[in-house]
Amino acid sequence: MITFLRGKLIDAVPTQVIVEVNGIGYEVLIPLSSFDKLPSKGQEVSLLTHLAIREDAHVLYGFMTNAEREMFRLLINTVSGIGPKLALNVLSGMNVTALRGAVANGDIKSLSQISGVGKKTAERIVVELKDKIGPAGAWEASSAQRALSALDQKTNDAVLALVALGFKQNDAYESVRAALTLLGADATVEHIVRTCLKKGG
């Protein structure tokens, strides 16, 4: 299994790149979300990869972040009817944070606007990924829509921690706000979470 490539970026178009590694040129298919993060041609690039083996071809898919590769694998391994090509389309049409938010919020309309994804496929994505994305996906997506001050970031981190521990998103947010009122803005995330857990227990 080829897990990553590091070499010179020879060529790049929105759907694929060519990376030279020790004199060998690798053609790698990439989503738009990764294309936007590529360095200039001729510079060194490091891509996380997924190798798909078919009867007629070995195809390398590349990603600039682990979150993109993990979402790609989740799509092809969990959602029936989604192969590597369509998974790449999904990641090209929506970044990982927005995709998590769409799944967590059941946003069929946004998902079905992605090229190649109809309403039925969008519904399957939501149904089959919802348990794997979890409620933290919705909070992560909503928080990404705004610039976070230091206090907002602290609130965000504490809410995500509580959601991961089983709190509902709204309950976590209210609990964090109450803890901040009690403890003050200088409290650490750990202190906030501990206070919320004590109140919750």
Image (tube, helix red, strand yellow):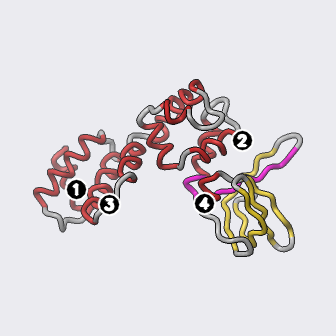
Residue 95: image x %, image y %?
A: 53, 49
Whichever of labels 2 and 1 marks the residue nearer the N terminus, that label is 2
- Marks 3/4: CA–CA distance: 23 Å
Tag 2 and tag 3, C-beta contact below 8 Å: no
**Residue in view at x 80 percent, y 69 percent:** 20
Three-letter residue code for mark 2: Lys
On residue 194, the disc is: 1
Q: Which of marks 1 and 4 is in front?
A: 4
Query: Nearer the N terminus, badge 3 or badge 1?
Result: 3
Taking 173 as reference, is 148 above or below it? below
Which mark, by number, is residue 148? 3
Closest to the observer: 31 or 201? 31
**Which of the image's four quarters has the C terminus?**
top left
**Where 50 sits versus 123, above or below?**
below
Label 2 to label 3, Cα distance in Å?
A: 35 Å
Task: Give the Cα distance between marks 1 and 4.
Answer: 39 Å
Tell me which numbered mark, 3 or 4, is placed earlier along the sequence: 4
Mark sitting earlier along the chain (4/2): 4
Could you tell me how far apart the alpha carbons at marks 3 and 1 are, in whole angstroms?
A: 22 Å
Q: What element carries label 2?
A: helix
Q: What is the magenta range?
A: 57-68
Of 23 and 51, which appears nearest the observer?
23
Q: Name the residue under label 2.
A: 85
Count every numbered label the image shows and give the total: 4
In the picture of the structure, the residue carrying the numbered disc 4 is 36
User: Which residue type does callout 1 highlight?
Assistant: Arg
